[in-house]
Amino acid sequence: MKKLFLSIVVVTLFVALLPEGVMAQEGLPDPAAIAGQNLRGHTHMFIAYFIAWLLILGWAVSIARRLGKVERALGD
């Protein structure tokens, strides 16, 4: 319990001592400048979704093949 309290105090002090610019998020880019930006920064997200869809598709194909084998075995 003491460790939890100490952790909370340390985190609170750390946040309280941060510069105001970090807390207020000053210096953010202009939204109009972001709108013209390409998607280079999001490439990792597209790759992750692509891999996830490949895994889901492979899983569905695997289930379909096993179901086909079961249907053929029942038909014999």
Image (cartoon, grey):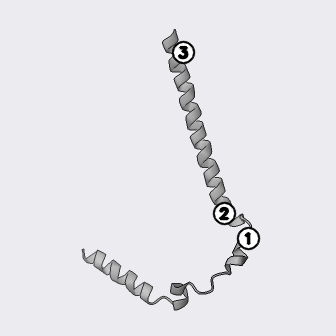
Tag 1: residue type? Gln
Q: Position of residue 60 (x, y in %)?
A: 56, 35
Give the alpha-carbon distance from disc 1 to disc 2, as whole Å.
Answer: 11 Å
Q: Residue at x 65, y 54 (%)?
A: 47
- In this rendering, is residue 14 above or below 34? below
Q: Residue at x 31, y 80 (%)?
A: 6
Q: Identify the residue position indicated by label 3 in the image.
A: 72
Q: Residue at x 60, y 39 (%)?
A: 57
Q: Quadrant of residue 41?
A: bottom right
Q: What label does residue 58 carry, if any?
A: none
Q: In terms of depth relative to the viewer, which is nearer, 55 or 34? A: 34
Between discs 1 and 2, the one toward the N terminus: 1
Element under disc 2: helix
Q: Residue at x 72, y 65 (%)?
A: 40
Q: Is label 3 in contact with label 1 (beta carbons under 8 Å)?
A: no
Q: Quadrant of residue 58?
A: top right
- In this rendering, is residue 60 above or below 49? above
Q: Identify the residue position indicated by label 2 in the image.
A: 42
- Mark 1 burial class by Cα count in 10 Å: few <14, some 14-19, many 20+: few
Give the alpha-carbon distance from disc 3 to disc 1, as whole Å.
Answer: 54 Å
Q: Position of residue 61 (x, y in %)?
A: 59, 32
Q: Identify the residue position indicated by label 1 in the image.
A: 37
Q: Of the residues tagged 3 and 1, which is closer to the observer?
A: 1
Element under disc 1: loop
- Mark 3 burial class by Cα count in 10 Å: few <14, some 14-19, many 20+: few
Tag 2: residue type? His
